[in-house]
Amino acid sequence: MTKPGLVLHIDPIACEGHGLCAELFPERITLDDWGYPIADATPIPRGLERHARRAASECPRCALRLVRSQVE
């Protein structure tokens, strides 16, 4: 069973590959060869939630969101 929590969701249609999210939250977001983000899909620990919220709020295209994970 997975513990519920916040996870990152990237809208690939809205994202333009600015890379700001990876600069603001390198603990969970890396960039691919073309500069588009790849997010770690595991729940974000409470200690990193503030950083995750900042990365999501600073996204110039609003392509990064925090969503509640589902318990499996």
Image: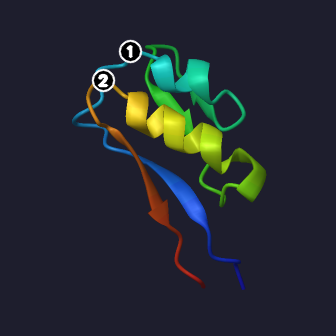
Q: Nearer the viewer, mark 2 or mark 1?
A: 2
Residue 52 drawn at (x, y percent): 57, 42
> Which residue bears the numbered disc 2?
60
Q: Which sits earlier in the primary sequence, circle 2 or circle 1? A: 1
The answer to whether residue 37 shows anywhere in this view is yes
Residue at the spot 50% in from the left edge and 33% down from the top edge = 55
Q: Quadrant of residue 57?
A: top left
How many numbered marks are there? 2
Q: Residue at 47% x, 18% y: name it.
A: 20
Up-down relation of residue 65 to residue 3 (above or below): above
Residue at 62% over, 38% down: 51
Find residue 53 and name its label: none
Q: Amino acid at mark 1?
A: His
Query: Badge 2, how many Cα within 10 Å: few under 14, some, many 20+?
Result: some
Does dot 2 land on a helix, a strand or a loop? loop
Q: Are marks 2 and 1 in contact (CB under 8 Å)?
A: yes
Q: Quadrant of the C terminus?
A: bottom right
Report, in whole angstroms, how far the alpha carbon at label 2 lies from the one at label 1.
Answer: 8 Å
Pick the residue in front: 15 or 56.
Answer: 56
Looking at the image, residue 37 lies above or below residue 50: above
The colouring scheme, among rainbow, by chain, secondary structure or one colour, is: rainbow
Q: Can you tell which quarter of the image residue 43 is in?
A: bottom right
> What amino acid is found at the position of numbered circle 2 in the picture?
Pro
Q: Position of residue 11 (x, y in %)?
A: 31, 43
- Quick one: label 1, few (<14), some, or many (20+) residues within 10 Å? some
Taking the spot 77% from the left edge, 50% from the top edge, the residue there is: 47
Q: Is residue 3 above or below residue 6?
A: below
Q: Looking at the image, can residue 45 be seen?
A: no
Where does the N terminus fall, quadrant-wise? bottom right
Residue marked by disc 1: 18
Q: Secondary structure at mark 1?
A: loop
